[in-house]
Image: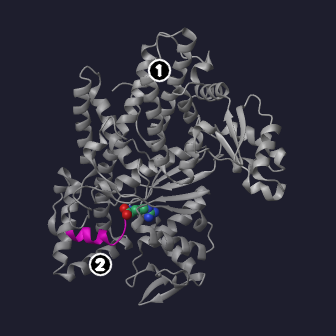
């Protein structure tokens, strides 16, 4: 559709003495589709052209030569309303999708520029809880959407594998755990002893002192501390990998916070050398009072570095290594202050990394049971949630389609897809309330609904005796086909908007809309069995829809199954 808008802008621009971009920027979508596809309001032009808006619109309607683009051009109350030529729209959009292969969302907007996306980044020795679902699926989807637009997306897992909690964990491990416990249920064990440590520490501050001492030893490279830490990391990664496999999520780099450890001394020294630090109660801080924020702590009194210190070092490292255009951090909104502070310190250092850094925040994923906290111990494991969703999906599929082959494999795609979609269909910032039933409803606004619609399109194509072909575009100009055709034609703009807003929900809402228009078409129009030219053309629309749905689902991280 954008091609049409651009072409029309090119023709209209000279009549208004403006650039093509300016003419394009004027265009609106008429509130009533019956008035046309494009509206050009003439009110803002009245002053420079010294004419009434109604007269400008009327003159434009007469002067504009939009043959082959527009079916009708009308002036109406100060607007120029343009209705595109239906058959041209159908031909252009559907043939574009059918020829475009897999990536018709590809507009070379990115031009090979790099965007680094930091996402998922769970904390070692803690269960992969449902709390990390959002960052994982949002980041994964954004990496695919940016790639679709021609960017090079670098996916980084910034594992939380460093910090004072590892001192606590070592103490807890020595007190409460024996090695063999790490074999059966490693994360469960580490998690239990961590909770137990906090319970005991409430009455025994000496434990906290001991934990600090162990973290100090870890930072100094003490052998025993290092090897225990190494084990915690190994067993955790193994468990996380199972979740990533279920979700189909991959990374280009697994670089935990510990990776930046060797760079911290020089990073702090560089900030000090620029005169940006002060000493406060023995700690090294960057005062940010002028920027309306609390100070950014770089080094504690005992010399230990912090989360922020490591993020500053990591940002400088990424900027140097990848020369990115953008660095995204998909992290919950509770860390907003942290990222503002880190960005401000980088800006004060005059590092370009500050400008490039974008925090992409999101709200909570709420279970009916309430918010989860690792310290309190009532954590919901993501793996359990995904497994349960797959079981429920298997039940639904068995009931609906008992003859289906590969039920288990399909149930896996549908169950996981249901959870992922339930997350992504909401704007990031909103809290998501988890609801098992709603999530798996094949008729609701769900992943399974879109997957089912995709499978339906596949089934029509399988049953057809003819091949899809655009032999009679007039067959796509009726009230059921044309809105679907136009919506399919918006796919590249949808991808671009989704990336610009860091919002996979834009793509999620779009595939829901495509699904509902396709289902309406399917119910009202007899696709198979008509005259050959008409049937082939209708099949071309079905094929185009199937491709767009498959691509949209892929961008969200779901699998498009062809039967379910
Ligand atoms: N590990 C952190 C957490 O789970 C998230 C890390 C996000 N990335 C970053 N560069 N700070 O809260």
Which quarter of the rendered picture does the N terminus lie within? top right
Which quarter of the figure has residue 247?
Answer: top left
475 relative to 190 in the view: left or right: right
Any magenta on residue 486? no
Disc 1 crowd, CA 10 A, few/some/many (<14, 14-19, 20+): few
Which quarter of the rendered picture does the C terminus lie within? top left
Q: Nearer the viewer, mark 1 or mark 2?
A: 1
Q: Is residue 34 above or below residue 140?
A: above
Which quarter of the figure has residue 553?
Answer: top left
Element marked by disc 1 = loop
Tell me the CA gap for discs 1 and 2: 74 Å
The disc label shown at residue 525, or none? 1
Q: Is residue 213 above or below residue 125?
A: below
- Residue located 75% across and 43% down the image: 9
Element marked by disc 2 = helix
**Residue 547's x, y, as percent?**
51, 29
Q: Is residue 71 above or below residue 438?
A: above
The number of discs equals 2
The disc label shown at residue 213, or none? 2
- Residue located 76% across and 45% down the image: 57
Q: Nearer the viewer, residue 288 or 307?
A: 288
**What range is drawn magenta here?**
162-172
Reading the chain from its start, which is encountered first: label 1 or label 2? 2
- Residue located 44% across and 23% down the image: 524
32 relative to 433 in the view: left or right: right
Ligand 1 occupies quarter: bottom left
Q: Nearer the viewer, residue 363 or 301?
A: 363
Any magenta on residue 169? yes
């Amino acid at each position: 559709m954008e091609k049409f808008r651009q072409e029309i802008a090119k023709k209209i621009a000279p009549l208004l003495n403006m650039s093509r971009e300016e003419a394009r920027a004027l265009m609106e979508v008429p509130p009533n589709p019956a008035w046309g596809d494009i509206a050009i309001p003439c009110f803002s032009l009245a002053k420079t052209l010294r004419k009434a808006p109604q007269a400008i619109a009327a003159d434009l309607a007469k002067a504009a030569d939009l043959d082959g683009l527009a079916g009708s051009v009308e002036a109406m109350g100060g607007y120029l309303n343009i209705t595109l030529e239906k058959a041209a729209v159908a031909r252009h959009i559907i043939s574009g999708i059918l020829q475009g292969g897999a990536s018709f969302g590809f507009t070379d907007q990115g031009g090979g520029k790099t965007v680094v996306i930091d996402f998922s980044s769970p904390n070692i020795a803690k269960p992969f809880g449902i709390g990390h679902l959002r960052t994982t699926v949002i980041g994964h989807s954004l990496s695919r959407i940016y790639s679709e637009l021609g960017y090079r997306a670098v996916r980084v897992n910034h594992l939380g594998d460093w910090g004072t909690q590892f001192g606590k964990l070592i103490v807890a491990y020595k007190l409460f755990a024996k090695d063999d416990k790490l074999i059966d249920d490693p994360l469960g064990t580490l998690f239990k002893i961590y909770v137990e440590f906090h319970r005991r520490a409430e009455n025994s501050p000496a434990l906290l002192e001991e934990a600090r001492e162990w973290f100090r030893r870890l930072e100094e490279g003490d052998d025993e501390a290092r090897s225990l830490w190494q084990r915690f990391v190994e067993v955790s990664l193994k468990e996380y990998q199972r979740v990533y496999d279920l979700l189909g999520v991959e990374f280009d780099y697994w670089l935990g916070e510990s990776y930046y450890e060797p760079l911290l001394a020089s990073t702090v020294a560089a900030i000090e050398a620029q005169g940006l630090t002060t000493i406060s109660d023995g700690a090294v801080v960057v005062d940010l009072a002028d920027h309306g924020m609390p100070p950014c702590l770089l080094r504690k009194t005992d010399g230990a570095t912090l989360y922020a210190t490591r993020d500053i070092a990591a940002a400088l490292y990424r900027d140097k290594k990848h020369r990115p255009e953008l660095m995204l951090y998909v992290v919950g909104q509770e860390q907003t202050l942290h990222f503002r502070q880190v960005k401000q310190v980088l800006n004060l250092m005059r590092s370009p990394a500050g400008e490039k850094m974008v925090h992409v925040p999101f709200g909570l994923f709420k279970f009916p049971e309430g918010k989860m906290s690792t310290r309190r111990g009532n954590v919901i494991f993501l793996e359990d949630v995904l497994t349960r969703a797959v079981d429920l999906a298997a039940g639904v599929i068995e009931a609906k389609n008992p003859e289906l082959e590969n039920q288990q494999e399909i149930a896996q795609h549908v169950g996981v897809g249901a959870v992922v979609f339930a997350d992504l269909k909401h704007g990031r910032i909103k809290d998501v309330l988890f609801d098992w039933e709603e999530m798996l409803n094949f008729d609701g606004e769900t992943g399974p609904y879109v997957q089912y619609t995709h499978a339906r399109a596949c089934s029509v194509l399988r049953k057809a005796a003819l091949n899809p072909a655009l032999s009679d575009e007039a067959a796509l100009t009726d009230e059921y086909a044309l809105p679907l055709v136009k919506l399919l034609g918006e796919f590249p703009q949808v991808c671009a908007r989704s990336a610009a807003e860091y919002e996979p929900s834009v793509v999620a809402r779009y595939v829901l809309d495509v699904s509902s228009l396709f289902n309406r078409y399917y119910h009202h129009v007899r696709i198979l069995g008509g005259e050959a030219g008409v049937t082939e053309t209708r099949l071309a629309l079905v094929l185009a829809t199937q491709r767009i749905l498959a691509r949209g689902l892929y961008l969200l991280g779901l699998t498009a199954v062809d039967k379910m």
